[in-house]
Amino acid sequence: MKIIRLATALLAVGAFAIGSASAQNYPRMSVRYSSNIPEVINTSRIDKYFSSEVEKRSGGAIRVQHFWANAIGGEAEMVDLVGSGAIDFGLIVTGNQFSRMPFTAVTNALPFVFNDGPKLNRLTRDIFTNNPTIKAELDALKLRPVLYRYLPDYRIYCTKPVRSLADIKNKKIRSYGTFVPVMLESIGAIPVNIPPVDMVQAMQSGAMDCTYMFNSSVSAFKIDQVAKYATDLSFGVISAHTLFTSTAKWAAWPENVRKLFEDVANDAEKFGNELIAADEAKAVDGLKTVGMEIVPFQQPADLAKMVPDMLDVWAKKMAEMGKGNEAKQLADYIRANR
């Protein structure tokens, strides 16, 4: 019995030594991780999952320091902060960087094009990895994508009920980027480009009648305090803020560190897909609980006819920039694979 106990103890010590040695293979690092959204937003749990798993799987050797809501650099600066390596990881809303990354932005910037979030993640990774124009665009900015996520069906939340196209006419609706305003104008609305953090104040002041978000974001952004009416009308899903690091930092990190980041990012994407789907599924009941009425939209087919083909709109914009052939090829690929 003593021999068995001794053998068991030696095996336990050996297993501990192997685990410790494995953890010690990772260099001691502290990385800075910038998010463009507040910590309280549900999708921030994806970022916290990433950091906690990196720390756990590295045996505590790699620590991740989060900076929420652009605390160490505004959205306009994030591309350069990440590309230069001043920030190790940064979430970038590619659609808000259209002038610098017009091809990279395609899956984030276009409403009324995509309907399946996990499939959109796969498509975004595909084109970021394999499309030569996007690869050249990212290389020029010294950016390497790390983690993908999507945002669920965008809808509108208003101070008055919206049941028809007549109700949308001349409504001032929160917008962003280059192409959401085109879509809103096509259905008779007036786009108001502002960041999410300013939505409530804009609606309180009357600068906006509606905001453009998704069900599971309503409470986090306190939209329910100013908008008492939602709609069942969907404007589609989009690729969300993508996590990037710099190409130079990525190349400088040891191979096992890069593999750790890749493995954790893949798992974080799966975690995010499940999180977003689950939160969106229960969000409707949450809206009703806070007293928001979900108004059925009576003319979805008529509205869809009014919206131009947003991939065509994007491709024409690219043609104006002298990139028409590349844009057509990418638009055709997206149509075949979305």
Image (cartoon, helix red, strand yellow):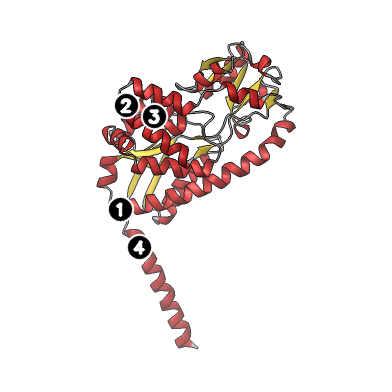
Q: Is residue 237 above or below residue 316?
A: below
- On screen, 203 above or below 50? above
Q: Which mark is residue 72?
A: 3
Check disc 2 and report its element: helix, strand or loop.
loop
Q: Which element carries disc 3, helix, strand or loop?
A: loop
Q: Secondary structure at mark 1?
A: loop
Tell me whether circle 4 and circle 2 mark residues in contact (CB < 8 Å).
no
Q: Nearer the viewer, mark 3 or mark 2?
A: 2
**Quadrant of residue 297 within the rendered picture:** top right
**Three-letter amino acid code of the residue under disc 2:** Lys
Q: Give the mark nearer the N terminus: 4 vs 2.
A: 4
- Sequence-wise, which precedes: disc 3 or disc 4? 4
Vertical placement of residue 244 versus 77, above or below: below
Q: Which residue is identified by label 1?
A: 27
Residue at point 42%, 31% (across, down): 106
Residue 309 drawn at (x, y percent):
50, 26
Q: Which residue is mark 2?
A: 323
Residue 71 seen by the camera: no
Determine which residue is flagged by label 4: 22
Hey, which quadrant is residue 3 in on the image?
bottom left
Asked if disc 4 and disc 1 are in contact, CB closer than 8 Å, the reply is no
The crowd level at tag 4 (other Cα within 10 Å; few <14, some 14-19, many 20+) is few
Secondary structure of the residue carrying tag 4 is: helix
Q: Position of residue 243 (x, y in %)?
A: 41, 39
Measuring 46% from the left and 79% from the top, which residue is drawn there? Answer: 8
User: Does label 3 or label 2 sit earlier along the sequence?
Assistant: 3
Do callouts 3 and 4 mark residues in contact (Cβ within 8 Å)?
no
Answer with left or right where residue 204 lies relative to residue 244: right
Which is more N-terminal, label 3 or label 1?
1
> Disc 4 residue type?
Ser
Q: Residues within 10 Å of mark 1 (few under 14, many from 20)?
A: some
The alpha-carbon separation of the residues under discs 4 and 2 comes to: 48 Å
